[in-house]
Image (tube, rainbow, N blue to C red):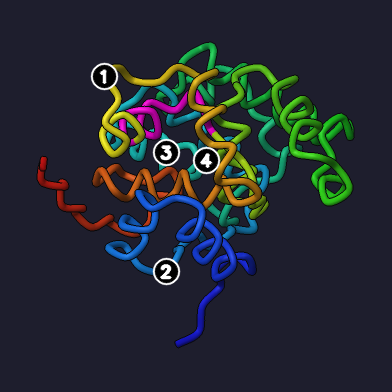
Amino acid sequence: MATNRVPYARKARTHLSKADPVLARIIAEVGPLGIQPRRERFQALARAIIFQQLAGAAANAIYGRFVGLFPDVEFPTPERVLAKTDAELRAVGLSEKKALYIKDLAAHIRDGKLNFHLFHRMTDDDIVAHLTQVKGIGKWTAEMFLMFHLGRPDVMPADDLGVQNAVRRHYRMRQRPNRKRLLKHAERWRPYRTAAAWYLWRSLDIVLPDGETKPKKIAKRKKR
């Protein structure tokens, strides 16, 4: 069966299974790493802005109306978005801030301040720094972009509540680990922390940031 999974998928599964017996159990239950990098760039970031702090149905409706402003294309160019007035963007349900954020993103791309063609030469930290210059794009959004759109193998979204909750559960911690503790814990997963995070999300039936496959249930270990 054809697949577009990330090229490091098999190596990540082998490495994590050897490095961490807890992850080995999760990996055995879940199966192959299912991250499939997407080609969208402007579209992915604009969608992330629209979906911030909104329930899925409402966000999908607004996103659909936004794309509907440009009926002749699958998704508009930055220039076409900038040509729309704030009133037109607000009319499809975007808040004043989100309309500003999407235009700021579009302007960064149009002016070359955000050049996706250069990303292959840049480190993860440099890409995060570039993306977070745009209004409305925070570190978490940048990390998701690295993982699910650029296919970077060693991203650890240490502020993600889903990852924190999964680590607390599977490693039997009394409290949800903060960023510092989680980063220290995740050192064993290098250089495949992206894969580790993906398996942890799947282990808790969390809706994945890539919006794709539904995860399996992972059975709780019995206390001895």
- Kindly identify the amino acid type of the residue bearing the numbered disc 2: Pro
- Kindly identify the amino acid type of the residue bearing the numbered disc 4: Leu
Q: In which quarter of the image is residue 43?
A: top right
Does residue 44 appear left or right of residue 212 in this picture?
Answer: right
Crowd tier of the residue under label 3, counting other residues whose Cα lies within 10 Å: few below 14, some 14–19, many 20 or above = some
Q: In which quarter of the image is residue 115?
A: top right
The total number of labels drawn is 4
User: Helix or strand or loop: what does disc 4 sit on?
Assistant: loop
Which residue shows up at 27% across the image and 55% down it? 215
Q: What stretch is highlighted in magenta?
A: 157-166
Residue 31 image offset from top left, x and y in percent: 35, 68
**Quadrant of the drawing holding the C terminus:** top left
Q: Which of 145 and 46 is in front in this view?
A: 145
Mark 3 against mark 1, which lies toward the viewer? 1
Sequence-wise first label, 2 or 1: 2
Q: Which residue is farthest bottom?
A: 1
Q: Quadrant of residue 54?
A: top left
Does residue 36 appear left or right of residue 154 in this picture?
Answer: left
The residue singled out by tag 2 in the image is 32
User: Helix or strand or loop: what does disc 1 sit on?
Assistant: loop
Q: Which mark is residue 65?
A: 3
Does residue 196 appear left or right of residue 23 in this picture?
Answer: right
- Kindly identify the amino acid type of the residue bearing the numbered disc 3: Arg
Q: Is residue 220 above or below residue 34?
A: above
The residue singled out by tag 4 in the image is 69
Mark 4 against mark 2, which lies toward the viewer? 2
Which residue shows up at 37% across the image and 60% down it? 27
Which residue shows up at 56% across the image and 27% down it? 184
The reply to whether callout 2 and callout 1 are in contact (CB within 8 Å) is no
